[in-house]
Amino acid sequence: MSKKSTKELENALGSTHVSDFEKFYHENRDDMNMEMDSFSVYIKDLLREKGLTQQKVFLLADIPERYGYKLLSGEKHTKQRDVILRICYAAECTLEETQKALRKYEMPQLYAKIPRDALLMIIFNERPGSIIDANTLLKKNGMEPLRTSGVQE
């Protein structure tokens, strides 16, 4: 069964009274985005598929374990895209998977017209090594390395 398009949902909402929302939601919830936990679910599913543990990813990402668990549980939220990029890189995400993770976390995707983002896109495609290697490439090209979670906003 295919998902209803946004237009189909909007059309149905046009004739739905506020008192009927519960019924509408029950009938259409599988077609709606549940963004509150979608980043967490998405990353955890990717880790499962790739045979990686959260603990290993946090270690490779150089993110404190407790902080990482809180991010993935939704208990904490970061405004730093670099933290999400570190998690994605350590989780061996492809560029496409990384872009999707950023969207689900409601952060700007990597953008080819921004030099640092362009280099990060190449780094995600080529996977030159660890986070340290990726940061070395960024620094070598005069760009800021991926920040750690230690610099909180």
Image (spheres, rainbow, N blue to C red):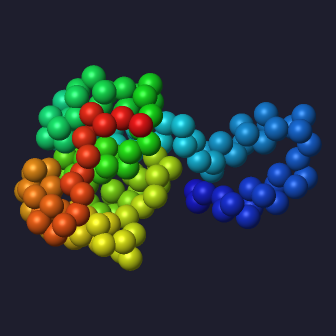
Q: Tell me where residue 40 appears, x and y as whole percent.
A: 40, 38
- The foreground one among 2 and 103 is 103
In the image, taking residue 59 as reference, residue 2 lies left or right, namely right
Q: Tell me where residue 51 appears, x and y as whole percent.
A: 18, 41
Above or below, comparing residue 9 to residue 43 in the picture: below
In the image, taking residue 95 as reference, residue 20 lies left or right, namely right
Residue 143 seen: yes
Who's the residue at 43% across and 28% down the image?
76
In the image, taking residue 116 as reference, residue 101 lies left or right, namely right
Going by the picture, which residue comes out furthest to the bottom? 113
Who's the residue at 19% across and 66% down the image?
142
The count of marks equals 0
Which quadrant, please, contains the C terminus?
top left
Residue 53 seen: no
Who's the residue at 54% across and 37% down the image?
36
Q: For residue 148, what is the image quadrant?
A: top left
Who's the residue at 44% across and 42% down the image?
79
Which quadrant, please, contains the N terminus?
bottom right
Q: Tell me where residue 119 appears, x and y as whole percent.
A: 24, 69
